[in-house]
Image: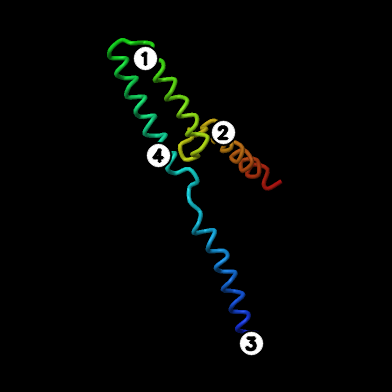
Amino acid sequence: MRSSIIGTLVVAAIGIGLAVPAMAQQKPHRRECMKLTQQIARYERDAGWARERGDELWEASNVQQAGNLSARRARLCPEFREPNYAAEFAAFVDVASRVATRWFLNGL
């Protein structure tokens, strides 16, 4: 009786210990990512206005600032990173070549 109670408590403690980190997982910079996205949109909008007015210096400074913010957002927020299609294609070709080799050599 006593061992079953202790076993139940141990299992419950382990379950709680595993559940707490899972519940606590949140995107680390979520609010900052949203703020950076809004700032990037603002600078891109201002660059469009500068382009309409023919002010090259204002446009260049806005484009540069939007680029700086985009780089920072890509570093902090992996969901906003540009996909690397070349690396994905290379991985696909690697897997496909391995499968084709085994197919044509009958598993050798």
Q: Which residue is mark 1?
A: 58
Q: Quadrant of residue 38?
A: top left
Look at label 4 and name its amino acid: Met
Badge 4: residue crowd in 10 Å (few <14, some 14–19, many ≥20): few
Look at label 3 and name its amino acid: Arg
Q: Which residue is mark 3?
A: 2
Q: Earlier in the sequence, mark 3 or mark 4?
A: 3
Q: State the image coordinates of residue 56 (x, y, percent, origin top left).
A: 36, 10
Badge 3: residue crowd in 10 Å (few <14, some 14–19, many ≥20): few
In the rendered image, the vertical position of residue 52 relative to residue 7, given as above or below: above
In the rendered image, the vertical position of residue 32 relative to residue 41, given as above or below: below
Q: Earlier in the sequence, mark 4 or mark 2?
A: 4
Q: Earlier in the sequence, mark 3 or mark 2?
A: 3
Q: Earlier in the sequence, mark 4 or mark 1?
A: 4
Of residue 23 and residue 98, the one placed in the foreground of this image is 23
In the rendered image, the vertical position of residue 66 relative to residue 4, given as above or below: above
Look at label 1 and name its amino acid: Trp
Instruction: Check whether the beta carbons of the residues at disc 4 and disc 1 lie within 8 A of each other.
Output: no
Q: Which residue is mark 4?
A: 34
Q: CA distance from mark 4 to mark 1?
A: 25 Å
The numbered disc on residue 87 is 2
Q: CA distance from mark 4 to mark 2?
A: 27 Å
Q: Earlier in the sequence, mark 2 or mark 1?
A: 1
Q: CA distance from mark 3 to mark 2?
A: 57 Å
Q: CA distance from mark 3 to mark 4?
A: 53 Å
